[in-house]
Image (cartoon, rainbow, N blue to C red):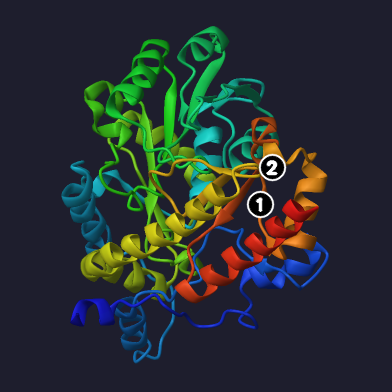
Amino acid sequence: MEKALKYSFESACEREGSNAEKYVLREALFGTKDVLPAWVADMDIDTPQCVLDAVKERLKHPVMGYEEVPASAFMAQIDWMKKEHGVDFSLEDMLYSHSVVASMHTAIEAFSKEGEGVIVQTPVYPPFFHSVLKLNRKLVKNSLLRDAEGKYRFDIKDLQEKIDENTKLLLLCSPHNPVGRVWEKEELEEILTICAERNIVVFADEIHSDLVYSPHKHIPFTSLGENAKNITVTAIGVGKTFNMAGFAMSSVAITNKELREKFFKAYERVHFAQGSSLSHVAFETAYKEGKAWLEALKVHLYKNYKMLETLTKKYPQFLKITPIEATYLAWLDCRAMGLKDKALRSFFINEAKLGLNPGISFGREGSGFMRLNFACSSAKMLKIVQRLENALQRRQLG
């Protein structure tokens, strides 16, 4: 009972008025402030108290100057990755980054040239394909396959057909945003076989790796063996796991020395520096003290997901929910509503009063879908579900 009380997610601090992105941009994105925002992938849940306490302690020192990422911070992450995911990194493998997207840009610069191919597996988090196009690389789309139950898988045949001698990099989203898959070892090994044979580097975005629901288990791509270590750049961090995106600190782990040196050349051109004094403290503390909080959080998040699932089962003529294995992002199949993407977005904004990500923004394969962030307090989740149910009831009544 004490633990349950210690980590209660029934309510959370109100973020409206705090300069939170999802609230500040409501009117610009949705044309109204009269929506509950459930889009950008951070949580409307308080950051762990252990992290906040550590930051308060650091603020007792009056100087906020340049600092290096302490070895102890990276070692805390290395220990976490070993205990939680069974993967071995060393201190020399680790580089600071302020975001996974920045790391992705750097990988594209490091391992490909303008006009060369970069593989993206859609539907996927929009910066995957935006980054490729902004850097003038060739976008190689290897769309995921979706079965009758709504589960997505790699299209290996399509991947093999689309690779040529100018294909240099594959951007792997693992676990996958937005479809919520935790890729199984056999699936990842198929990707590894192809990429190792063709000398294609794999940038593995594993930022959601700690947000996996039992019985599923995240398999770090680089853990698949020596061939994987030789071609993998792994992006990981605390931002999603502990709701710490505002600290702007993640990391890149590269085991292969040659690969690391190539990445570092592009990395130095950008001048990433070493992040902020407070981020270092927050990052290390989260990995050292946040385990119990995370376990309680995952139980709460899954309850929120089940609330959405119950609602979709109540209105199967309108919605289906994609089975979730990881993340706090529900991928809603709204195609049965018979609405084009613009009208579907309008339904959620004007009838359900909810601000969601339109599926089409994740690639054409997302047409007819919407992404809903359910990482919020129980109180807010009830409001989200009620608003959506009210809108569906009105539509049912015609």
Residue pictured at 35% horizontal, 72% vertical: 282
Find residue 358 and report its horizontal and vertical position in percent: 69, 47
Crowd tier of the residue under label 2, counting other residues whose Cα lies within 10 Å: few below 14, some 14–19, many 20 or above:
some
Assign the N terminus to one quadrant of the image. bottom left
**Under tag 2, what secondary structure?**
helix
Vertical relation: 251 (above or below) 167: below
Vertical relation: 31 (above or below) 309: below
Nearest the eye: 127 or 42: 42
Vertical relation: 261 (above or below) 59: above
Residue pictured at 35% horizontal, 75% vertical: 48
**Under tag 1, what secondary structure?**
strand
Nearest the eye: 119 or 343: 343
Vertical relation: 378 (above or below) 171: below
Crowd tier of the residue under label 1, counting other residues whose Cα lies within 10 Å: few below 14, some 14–19, many 20 or above:
many
Left or right: where 397 falls relative to 328: right
Is residue 338 visible in the rendered image? The answer is: yes
Three-letter code for the amino acid on which mark 1 is drawn: Asn
Find residue 316 and report its horizontal and vertical position in percent: 59, 43
Three-letter code for the amino acid on which mark 2 is drawn: Ser
Callout 1–callout 2 Cβ contact below 8 Å = yes
The residue wearing badge 2 is 361
The residue wearing badge 1 is 357
Left or right: where 31 falls relative to 130: right
Nearest the eye: 74 or 355: 355
Residue pictured at 58% horizontal, 79% vertical: 15
Find residue 100 and report its horizontal and vertical position in percent: 48, 49
Left or right: where 35 falls relative to 346: left
Residue pictured at 33% horizontal, 49% vertical: 212
Nearest the eye: 296 or 199: 296
